[in-house]
Image (tube, grey):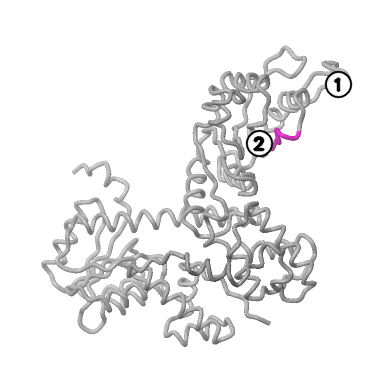
Amino acid sequence: MTLPKQAQHRISETLAVVEDEPVQREVLAGSLEDEGYQVQTFPCAEDCWRALQHGECSPDLVITDLCMKDMSGIDLLGHIKELNPEIPVVVVSAFADVPQAVDAVRAGAFHFLTKPLELDAVHNLIHEALAKRRLEHEVDSLRSRLTEELGLKGLVGQSQHLTEVLTQANRVARTDVPVLLMGESGTGKNLLAKTIHLASLRGSGPLVTLNCSTLGEGVLESELFGHEKGSFTGAEETRPGYFEQAAEGTLLLDEVGEIPLHVQVKLLNVLQDRTFLRVGGSQPIPMQARILAATNKDLQQAVSEGTFREDLYYRLNVFTIQLPTLRERKADLPALIERLMETIADEYGLECPPLQRDAHDALLSYSFPGNVRELKNILARAMVMASGSPVTLNDLPVALRPTPEQGASLARNEPEDNSLPEQVTRLETRLIEEALDAHNRVKTRAAESLGISERLLRYKIKKYNLTPRPKDS
């Protein structure tokens, strides 16, 4: 039997179906097998839990009935989250009971469904859950690699914007496609270029960066292509340019929008022919490097204004990644602040002090027009001002100290999502924060007071991006 094309990639994914009603169990399992999944079925939660403990079942997703004898679906969900918090669990009930749905979501369920099941909806939900899990694995793998090799500083966080960027970077890194990185100054374009380079097959080779905005026309051409001895006054020896230095690695053209038009023509010829001439040379040299380009300019507008060649724009713009501003990834701020303070302490030999809550809240409320670069500068100044003591609001620039009227205005204008999942998220976040505060941020004790395992608490902290909040001194 040939599987439909859309199902072929699912053949290695295993689902566990836990249902005490035989007919419903077999109908659901059969429909999932028709979709290309491998399916293991269990008539009760105890059998599933036993198989998981003994390694007889390693599912990528679990669908469990809620109401069963002895062990309920919620109990099984809790055990699964303690064993492996990454396994998505879908809970099914015969009753559309809101408190039950809240309990399931609070316990970590990916979704809550009511019977009778609509099989198409179930298939779509499973596809969404598994796609999300694959995406998280890709991004986590890339983050781990970058943390080891770069001491990852700027690309920290779990926001959707950042996750999308890292996913795109991970996928395009495996190719030799030219990539155009676009974003405001300070958003981390150079760091993302390192990300792509390290994740590529060229990662063991050099990453050479040329800032096109810092060099004059004649110097830029010589730096790019190199020059022969005697080709111009002062050229006392032959010198290889950036194309040769990059060899079979990666060449990043930073601020590519600043390249003069006559150099753009020569760059276009290199990208088309994959060869170049040194200044004053006559022997073509193969261009072996992969090209990445970065800019904070709107190149399409530059094309329309005649300051950037359209043909070069399309050569560079085969794959574009738009980096989000820090304003667009506010959810990443707590983790990013913590990481940057550790980095600053290492770089400048400073102590890494705690942040008082008023300073922490002021940072979270600021818009950061200079993005991550501005945040790092603000934190470095504050740490110097604090001299090892907790960082207070007075250690921050005046622009970050909101007036009472501004704070009230922000509170009034804050849109609130009152959907059930969002209400559950807010409730769970508040309970976790209160438990951590009550037990001096000790996770073991906080978990005990919440009636969950420390492992599940750590999962929740990661899920909701709840980096430990500093207490007032």
Identify the magenta region: 208-214
Q: CA distance from mark 1 to mark 2?
A: 26 Å
Spot the residue most to the left.
23
Identify the residue at the far front of this view. Answer: 405
Image location (x, y in percent) of residue 46: 27, 78
Image quadrant holding the C terminus, namely bottom right
Residue drawn at 68 percent across, 33 percent down: 246
Residue at the (27%, 65%) spot, across then down: 16
Sequence-wise first label, 1 or 2: 1
Q: Say which quadrant the N terminus sits in.
A: top left
Q: Amino acid at mark 2?
A: Glu
388 displayed left or right of 437: right
Task: From this view, report whether residue 356 is shown above or below residue 312.
Answer: below
Q: Is residue 164 left or right of residue 100?
A: right
Q: Residues within 10 Å of mark 1 (few under 14, many from 20)?
A: few
Residue that mark 1 sits on: 235
Quarter location, residue 341:
bottom right
- Label 2, secondary structure: give it: loop
Please give left or right for residue 340 compared with residue 233 in the image.
left
Identify the residue shown where x is 77% and y is 28%.
216
Q: Which residue is mark 2?
A: 255
Circle nearer the viewer, 1 or 2 = 2
Q: Quadrant of residue 316?
A: top right
Q: Measured from the top left, where is residue 45 in percent x and y?
A: 26, 76
The amino acid pointed to by label 1 is: Ala
**In this view, 216 is above or below 12:** above
Within 10 Å of disc 2 (Cα), the crowding (few <14, some 14-19, many 20+) is: many
